[in-house]
Structure formats: C-alpha cells, structure tokens
Image: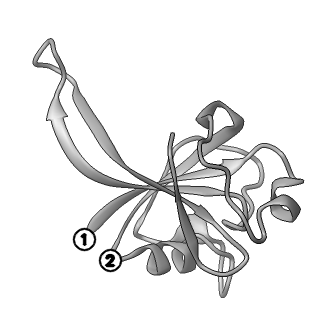
Amino acid sequence: MKEYYIYHSKDPMDMCLRLSKAPEQIDLDNYDLVAMVESESLGDTFRITNHIESNWLDNPEVRIAYKRERVRSTSVGDVVVEITDITLGEDGLGKVKTGKAYMVMGVGWEEVKV
C-alpha cells in the first residue's frame, strides 16, 4: 500500500483550464489538503476519493485532513501527492515526507513540480 495526500484546488476554474495541459509547477498554497489515503495506485486513490456509492470520507482508506461541511469529489485540476520517502527531521523528532505530485487531467494524470 502507498500513501497519498489529496489536495483540492481552491479555484473552481481549474476544472476547465486543466482538461488538456497541466502547468509545469504549482503552488500548494492554491490547494486545500483534504485527506490522506492508503491505496495501491493513483487510479484507486481517485476512485476512493469520489462520491460513487457513498460519501468518500466514509471510506476506511481515508484519513480526513480537516473537517468541512462539504467536501467534493476529487476532480480535474486537483493534485495527488504520492509519498515516496519518509525521513526523520533535522531535529530527529518529526518525520519529513516527500513524494511525486500528479495533477488530475481530463484523461489520466500528469506529473507536476511543487
């Protein structure tokens, strides 16, 4: 199982702008961290974070990052970070997680720099 961080765009126009081309670099300040998910792949993560048969926040693979009245499904323009490495912080106390970021496109995923 892999760990994924789910970031939803704060700009609803991202859904329209990102149908075919992702920007080379993004600023995560323009996104809300909504959840962390354990799954096998990006595709599974997308399925798990969509309201298909029930509210996706109720899925057992999901850890909610913060409470909001409503959280939408993951969609085009949103970003999923696949955690690839966990190391101890410089002080030896905290964990530092790094990974690869992918933007949800109209079809598939595109890797982006954060």
Whether residue 91 sits left or right of residue 5 in the image: it is left
Which quadrant of the structure image shows residue 61? Answer: bottom left
Which quadrant of the structure image shows residue 67? Answer: top right
> What quarter of the picture does the N terminus occupy?
bottom left
Work out whether 25 lies above or below 108.
Answer: above
Q: Are marks 1 and 2 in contact (CB under 8 Å)?
A: yes
Secondary structure under the numbered disc 2 in the rendered image: loop
Work out whether 41 lies above or below 12.
Answer: below
Residue at the image point whose x is 48% and y is 80% from the top: 43
Work out whether 89 lies above or below 80.
Answer: above
Q: Which mark is residue 1?
A: 1
Whether residue 16 sits left or right of residue 87 in the image: it is right
Whether residue 76 sits left or right of residue 2 in the image: it is right
Crowd class of label 1 (few under 14; some 14 to 19; many from 20; radius 10 Å) = few
Secondary structure under the numbered disc 1 in the rendered image: loop
Give the image location of residue 68, x and y in percent.
Answer: 71, 44
The residue carrying mark 2 is: 40
Work out whether 32 lies above or below 54.
Answer: above
Residue at the image point whose x is 14% and y is 12% from the top: 91
Give the image location of residue 27, x and y in percent.
Answer: 62, 34
Q: Which residue is the extreme one toward the bottom?
A: 53
